């Protein structure tokens, strides 16, 4: 129980830190940056979540191979649920900034008969 709570707190801190990074420590507005730069930043947050969960599962498998050691039997939804929800919101932001980038590129071209 204590270990699960600790992992949940680590997850919470990772989400908070991602939010701080995405807001450039409160110094810049995400919407003022180039869409491609924002997308890279947001993708790093998704990569962090995937890596975190991969490491958890890798450790869990290692412990399963050593039956005499204490096993991971934690509720993964409790541990990763908040980060997964955050990742879904980040994915939507990536889609939004991709669309903005596409329209930005289109706006740079003069199409025949359109100005």
Image: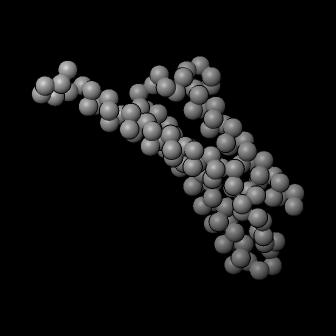
Position of residue 2 in the picture relative to residue 40 (left or right): right
**Is 44 on the left or on the right of 17, as rendered?**
left
Picture residue at 41% right of the left edge, 27% below the top: 34
| Relative horizontal placement of residue 27, taking residue 9 as reference (left or right) | left
- Residue 66 visible in the picture: yes
Q: Please tell me which residue is depicted at 72% across the width and 41% down the height of the picture.
A: 13
- Left or right of 95: which side holds 113? left
- Residue at (49, 26) in percent of width and height: 31
Whether residue 36 is visible to the viewer of this picture, yes or no, is no
Image coords of residue 66 (percent x, y): 73, 77
Q: In the rendered image, which quarter is residue 81 located in?
A: bottom right
**The N terminus is located in which quarter?**
bottom right
Q: 70 and 87: which one is in front?
A: 87
Applied colour scheme: one colour
> In the figure, 75 relative to 110: above or below?
below
User: Looking at the image, which residue sits at the far front?
Assistant: 113
Count the marks.
0
Where residue 77 sits, quadrant-wise, is: bottom right
Which residue occupies 54% across, 22% down? 29
> Is 13 or 71 nearer to us in this picture?
13
Q: Quadrant of the C terminus?
A: top left
Question: What x and y, as percent, mark residue 14?
Answer: 68, 43
Seen in the picture, residue 113 relative to 60 is either above or below; the reply is: above
Task: Give percent across and percent down for residue 11.
Answer: 71, 48
Picture coordinates of residue 2 (x, y %)?
A: 87, 57
Q: Is residue 14 above or below residue 49?
A: above
């Amino acid at each position: 129980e204590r270990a699960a709570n600790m992992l949940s707190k680590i997850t919470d801190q990772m989400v908070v830190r991602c939010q701080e990074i995405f807001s450039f420590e409160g110094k810049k507005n995400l919407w003022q940056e180039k869409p491609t730069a924002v997308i890279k930043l947001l993708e790093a947050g998704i990569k962090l979540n995937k890596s975190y969960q991969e490491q958890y599962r890798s450790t869990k498998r290692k412990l399963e191979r050593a039956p005499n050691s204490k096993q991971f039997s934690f509720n993964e939804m409790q541990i990763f649920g908040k980060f997964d929800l955050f990742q879904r919101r980040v994915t939507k932001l990536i889609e939004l900034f991709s669309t903005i980038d596409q329209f930005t590129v289109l706006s740079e071209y003069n199409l025949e008969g359109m100005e």
